[in-house]
Each structure stands twice: as C-alpha cells, then as structure tokens.
Amino acid sequence: ALDVEWRRLEIIAQNLANANSTGGVDGAVYHAQRLISGPKASFDRYIDSGSVDALQGVAVQAIETDAEPPRLVHEPGNPRANAAGFVAYPAIDHAEQMTLMMRTERAYEANIVAMNAARQMYSKALELGKRA
C-alpha cells in the first residue's frame, strides 16, 4: 500500500508541475493522469478460501489519462497562441489535485502508523516469548 500511495503522490506532483505548461516539443498539451489501484488478488479468492492469508495487498491497476479538453486562455502575445490569440493549457484543477494530495498523504501516513504498530506488537510478543 505504501508503494501505491507513493506512486499516486508522484502522479499528483506531475499533474501540478504541468498545470501551466503550454505543450511539449510536439505541441501536444499535457493531460492530467490518475492512478487506479485495487487488490493484487481477486476478492473472490479470499471469499472462497475464508483465510486472511489469501489477501495479498494493493497494486496499481492502471494509470488513466484525463480526456478533459484543454482550457483556452486569451494571450495573443504568447508564441504558442493560435490564430485567434488563445493558448491551450491543461485542464487541471489545482484545488482538486491539492485535496487529492492531502488525502493520499494521510493514507500513506496511516499505513506507516499501522506498520509501526504491528512492529511494536511483534516486538512485545517476542519479549513475552523470552520470558516464558
């Protein structure tokens, strides 16, 4: 889960970094990307086995490209402006991306807290085992 959330943060950062780009060398406008995650193994497998061991964690399922058309800004002096004086920028909502970044950061943090709690429990179990 930590790897998936880290990858999601990378994609969000990439979206924010390209929010004001006017296009690459080929002239194509950047389109926002979105990470789709899900279970590594089918949930049916868990149901059929009835064992927690069948759960294998989370994986990146796909990275989708947003089909939203670019936003046009009237900047006649810009070298990338079209004949009407409009420049195409990616249709990226800064507020949405920042909200997603904060939510992803919280999920990453929660996974670290859970991992540390499990490590402390294992450590305590080892201590109890040494005493017995």
Image (spheres, rainbow, N blue to C red):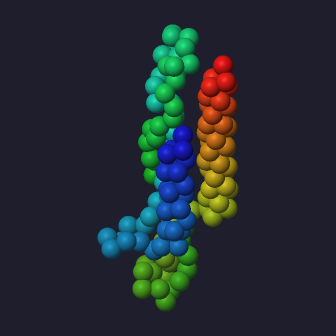
**Rendered image quadrant of residue 128:** top right
Quadrant in the rendering for residue 99:
bottom right
Above or below for 131 versus 4? above
Q: Residue at x 49, y 45 (%)?
A: 3
In the rendered image, the quadrant that contains the C terminus is top right
Q: Position of residue 107 (x, y in %)?
A: 64, 45
Image: 26 above or below 123: below
Q: Is residue 34 visible?
A: no
Q: Tell me where residue 22 appears, x and y as whole percent.
A: 45, 74
Residue toward you, 119 or 82: 119
Viewed as shown, does residue 116 lie left or right of 86?
Answer: right
Q: Residue 102 versus residue 127: which sits nearer the camera?
A: 127
- Residue that appears at 48% across and 73% down: 21
Identify the residue at the far bottom of this view. 77
Residue at 67% from the left image edge and 55% from the top image edge: 102
Locate residue 116, reporting x and y percent. 64, 41
List the single residue furthest toward the left: 26
Residue 1 visible in the shown view: yes
Residue at 67% x, 24% y: name it: 131
> Where is residue 117 drawn, in percent x and y?
67, 37
Q: Quadrant of the N terminus?
A: top right
Q: How many marks?
A: 0
